[in-house]
Image (tube, helix red, strand yellow):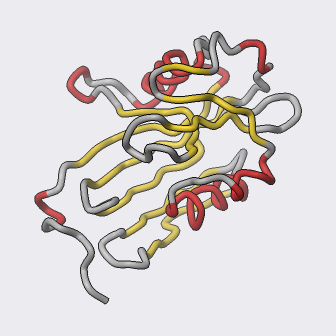
Amino acid sequence: MPDSTPSEPSSLPHRIAVLCYLYDTDGRILMLHRAKPPNQDLYSPVGGKLETELGECPWACARREIEEETGLHISAEDIRMFGMISETAYEGSGHWLLYLFEVTRPIEPDELAFTEFDEGQLEWIPQEKVMDLKIPETDRRVIWPMVCKHRGGFFGVHIDCRTDPFTWSVVQESS
């Protein structure tokens, strides 16, 4: 298969980010209909880039992103890492290291300080409807199925986007 990457992988920037999974008492997941790149006009969980220049740790980043995107103040006891994704040459524009966090307590929808902001619109989605949304292909084929399978456990996955279709492998998993 031809290499779909416009640049050599070594010349692409490396980005570190978090994805945060929040559920309400009905089991619905909070998704952001993104108004900005990356993944503009697609749905994704709350999250964002680590402030690496400040030495921010992934846990602090997850709590900060949740607060910035929902107004919620989540205590350290109510959040846990449950996954790690590495992506080589995502969209041919960069390598990503994604830490996945879940908020371990249910969130009441009225706890959100707002549902619309410059990043997009927050929506509570029944889990069985996530695959009906416009989500990134890596989320559709790899990340969302792994999230569903490993909630309460842990998984690590590497996705190589240099070819079309991309390839992926599970490097660690536990229930």
Give the total number of marks visible in the rendering: 0
Q: Residue 81's quadrant in the figure? A: top right
The residue shown at (88%, 34%) is 26
Q: Which residue in the rendered view is the most extreme toward the bottom?
A: 1
Q: Quadrant of the C terminus?
A: bottom right
The answer to whether 45 is drawn above or below residue 148 in the figure is above
Q: Residue 52's quadrant in the figure? A: top left
The residue shown at (33%, 41%) is 16
> Residue 27, image x and y in percent?
83, 38
The residue shown at (43%, 25%) is 61
> Residue 117, image x and y in percent?
51, 19
**Image side of residue 148 versus residue 164, left or right:** right
The residue shown at (53%, 42%) is 100
> Residue 132, image x and y in percent?
71, 57
- Nearest the viewer among 131 and 166 is 131
**Image side of residue 50 versus residue 150, left or right:** left
Q: Quadrant of the N terminus?
A: bottom left
**Image side of residue 44 versus residue 118, left or right:** right
> Residue 112, image x and y in percent?
68, 15
- Nearest the viewer among 22 and 121 is 121
Q: Residue 55's quadrant in the figure? A: top left
**Image side of residue 174 versus residue 117, left or right:** right
- Nearest the viewer among 47 and 114 is 114
